[in-house]
Image (cartoon, coloured by chain):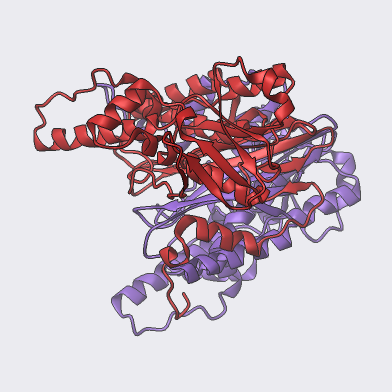
Chain colours: A purple, B red
Amino acid sequence: MADKRTEIVEIGGEFGLIDRIASQFHPQIQSTIKGIGDDTAVMDLGSDYGLLTTDLLVEGIHFDLTFHPLPHLGYKAIAVNISDIAAMNGIPQQVVISLGLSNRFSVEAVDELYKGIRAACDDYRVDLVGGDTTASRSGLIISVSVFGKVAKDKIAYRNTGKPNDILCVTGDLGGAYMGMQILAREKQVYLADPNMQPDFNGKEYILQRQLKPLARMDVVYELEEAGVVPTSMIDVSDGLSSELHHICRQSKTGAVVFEDTLPIDEQTALVATELNIGPITAAVNGGEDYELLFTIKQEDHAKLKNNPNITFIGYLTGDSGEILLRTKSGNVVPMKAQGWQHLSS
Amino acid sequence: MADKRTEIVEIGGEFGLIDRIASQFHPQIQSTIKGIGDDTAVMDLGSDYGLLTTDLLVEGIHFDLTFHPLPHLGYKAIAVNISDIAAMNGIPQQVVISLGLSNRFSVEAVDELYKGIRAACDDYRVDLVGGDTTASRSGLIISVSVFGKVAKDKIAYRNTGKPNDILCVTGDLGGAYMGMQILAREKQVYLADPNMQPDFNGKEYILQRQLKPLARMDVVYELEEAGVVPTSMIDVSDGLSSELHHICRQSKTGAVVFEDTLPIDEQTALVATELNIGPITAAVNGGEDYELLFTIKQEDHAKLKNNPNITFIGYLTGDSGEILLRTKSGNVVPMKAQGWQHLSS
């Protein structure tokens, strides 16, 4: 290794590292349409575009097997990658999975994991077509790659939003974050007294949001039926604010979000209040909801206004980089992009 | 986890686990041509086939940073996946990489790794188009997936060899295995006395074979130029014997290999003798050479006989599963498939 030592955190952590890598690699071959910088890579297949995405999940960083049941984890590993394909307005096709297994994993444990993987493959109509299994000295490692397709005139990038486009989000926000808070709390209770039963009553929805999130392929199909192609799209893995900053930075726009439109489930709001967290904070900065954040042309508003899965939360502006939250009281405040840290934070 | 506990080794280790998973997943969607069971998955793209492969490399299992320079490791991580695309007679196109990094890795170390990744991307004319970086609690994790293409009438599977087809192998065999033996020996010397300089003189070739193997894309292009499509093909990652067993099992054939034809480099033979290992044992059972093992029709022999990269080592027979080695002395012995274990063995 070189003499000088720069910590990865000094260059901005994961995002800084990705920017650094992206600056060193530029597509050279003709079939590459889009390299690093969107939810998936894009390849020219002739009549369609191909999409390729990959994610690495590491025990102790992305999940904690104390509270993550293996079938749910298997499901989640697939769903979070399908979500990236959905964020390009694409249809997932094939998936490959590599597993690193330490020797505390039995055949039965691997079967449990694959039970969830199979359920996700069935739900999203994708084929598991390959992978790799290997030993690991440090718990469970799951690497998933998904290949998908999209018609060339249907693809939705991050960098193609325009001022006055309407900002839309699917489902509701902040639930996965509150689910994680509850799991962390109950783990502390359990560690203090293993005889205590965890208190998950009335929290089923937010726990499911954290442990077994769904990819919004349903909305991708609904957009197709409604004849709407988003002008830009991204999935909400690191929190609304962080994702909106990606869209605005790449589209060279600003945005205004109306606080009172943000979709927040009742359980999310209740638990947030119980834990002294503002529900809006959870909705704006909480990650791992895997909803879709997208923009549409004004003229497409009527085509989607009756869709119960979609909420209109604001619009893009020409003020590049200025991302504002209009509060219920009528104030306008900058919406900061707090980088979402997964479990390890 | 379930009550019963079966160790993975009880069902035959990695290969047993892959068989178990494969038996639970059957392609459902139309565009899947080939799922688990070949060097890559195969997808119908319309005019061509798409190829998708993935590999997971874990520190302490697949590599040892005591002797693996980071640029070489980056190169190897790409090359071993390109080798899988080559083994389908395909052309690699795009690659995605995920890294898990423990906090002992600095920005400079990551740069070193990407130096090798970039060199491999240049050599094999592929674009790095995405990936993921994350923390890791246990050293370096590298997951690579490669997408490639092949004309539908050029694809080479494992299961399509026929009796009397000629068995061919590229390059030479056993070098990577002997390289690993030398590295392991010098590491012991170093651990015993850190002031000792490692003795790598005259062993450069076999060390390169282990530390920076090449994918045989050159031979894929030469086959194309010669107008030869292999009747079956696989890459030699787990050793000649193991790979030949895969071809014969899947093609329902037997095989005869002539010991005196096996291509063995002089350094491999010298070091094998020095370490009291039979050169033939190294060539037959040593893994990680990443050469191509393939079969051709008899009538194609003339088209390849002057190619210095290709050696004819035997032929397929109709005796399903009977894989024989004809020794220099004229004896015929069964060639056993010793499962190759990587570094961890």
Q: Choose top left, top right, bottom left or bottom right for residue B40.
A: top right
Res B140 seen here: yes
Residue A13 sits in quarter: top left
Viewer-proximal residue, A313 or A227? A227
**Is A150 placed left or right of B279 in the picture?**
right
Q: Residue at x 44, y 30 (%)?
A: B173
Q: Position of residue B60 (x, y in %)?
A: 32, 45
Residue A170 vertical placement versus A228 (above, below): below
Residue drawn at 55 percent across, 57 percent down: B18
Residue furthest toward the front? B330
For residue B336, side relative to residue B52 (left or right): left
Give how far across and how far down residue B237 sits, in percent.
48, 39
**Horizontal and vertical percent for residue A150?**
79, 40
Compare residues B221 and B211 and report the one nearer the observer: B221
Where B208 falls versus A180 (above or below)? above
Q: Residue A311 appears at what percent x and percent y?
A: 75, 54
Residue drawn at x 54%, y 81% is A201
Q: Quadrant of residue B204?
A: top left
Whether residue A75 is visible, yes or no, is: no
- Name the residue nearer the viewer: B54 or A91: B54
